[in-house]
Amino acid sequence: MSQAIELIDALNGTFGRHSGARASHAKGFSARGRFIPAAVGPETDIPLLAEEQPIVARFSVGGGKPGISDKSPTVRGIGLEIGKGAGAWAMALISNPVFFANSAEQFKAFLAARVADPATGGPDPEKVKAFNEANPNTVPHQSYLKSVAPCRCYSAEQYHSGHAYHFGTSEGVLAARILLEPEGGRHGLTDEEKKDLPDDFLYDRLLRELSNRPARWTLKLVVANGADDISDPTVPWDGVHGELILGTVQIELPDDRAESVAKVFDPSHLPEGVAEPHDNVFALRGPAYAVSVARRSS
């Protein structure tokens, strides 16, 4: 637990500690909908997904500042809980295909390099450069954010697990990363939108879309090939990959129920048929979520 405390301390040290807010992905809102199984049936043995299930979701902007701009060049996130009770499946997915650290020490060092300089109000570029040179595996995460415009709406974003989970199939156990693929494809903000939109537009924009029709994503597994590193969530997967379709995630309504707003999307809560990733970062998630919850509840 001491390591988990250090991780939340690092987040609070970089973004500040904000009463009632999450240490990471502090800005967000809840919604609800349902999971609809694939028409042909899942190719993996996950009993939970054999029939329609309720969903609680939370959309968010990365970072620990509740007032961060919706146009900021950081990740967008979705927390999902498919089903109810002890057998539910919790996911914490982000818009970046890879994570920014592969260990607790790297996680802390990444954030330490980005603590705001009091003189400028932003990170010291030399500290960031030095960190990147010492930790080249973290650069793909940063490069993606620099090259891809923030999404124009939460419904127009892809969401990735980064971690490679393990799934049982008729042909044995396979490793795969989770992907939510938006029904209408991914769309980033244009330069005009970045200039003209207010800093708080994502909530209103999604609500306008939901007033006309649900937002839908295909829930997929991107299957690892022989060259993929399945133990390091910072490493991009290149080449050709098979995909397994699990079904549709359909978001229908905003959800301001107290239990939904307070919900913790701890991805270590896995259903029957899904085994946890074998990487150092995933092992830290459950304890770190517990520390974060305790702090925002105190």
Image (spheres, rainbow, N blue to C red):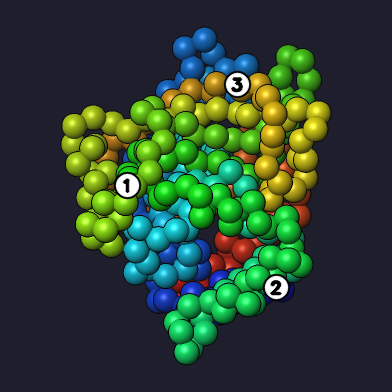
Residue to which mark 1 is pinned: 190
Q: Secondary structure at mark 1?
A: loop
Residue 28 is left or right of residue 132, and the answer is left
Residue 184 seen in the current view: yes
Q: Residue furthest right?
A: 226
N-terminal of the two: label 1 or label 2?
Answer: 2
Residue 130 in which image quadrant: bottom right
At horizontal 28% and vertical 62% (from top left) the residue drawn is: 199
Marker disc for residue 243: none
* Label whose residue precedes the other's in the sequence (3 or 2): 2
Residue type of the residue flagged with mark 2 = Ala
Q: Nearer the viewer, residue 34 or 62?
A: 62
Q: CA distance from mark 3 to mark 2?
A: 40 Å
Is 123 drawn above or below residue 64 in the view shown?
below
Q: Secondary structure at mark 3?
A: strand
In contact (CB < 8 Å): disc 1 and disc 2 = no
Mark 3 to mark 1: distance in Å?
32 Å
Find disc 2 in the rendering and name its residue: 130
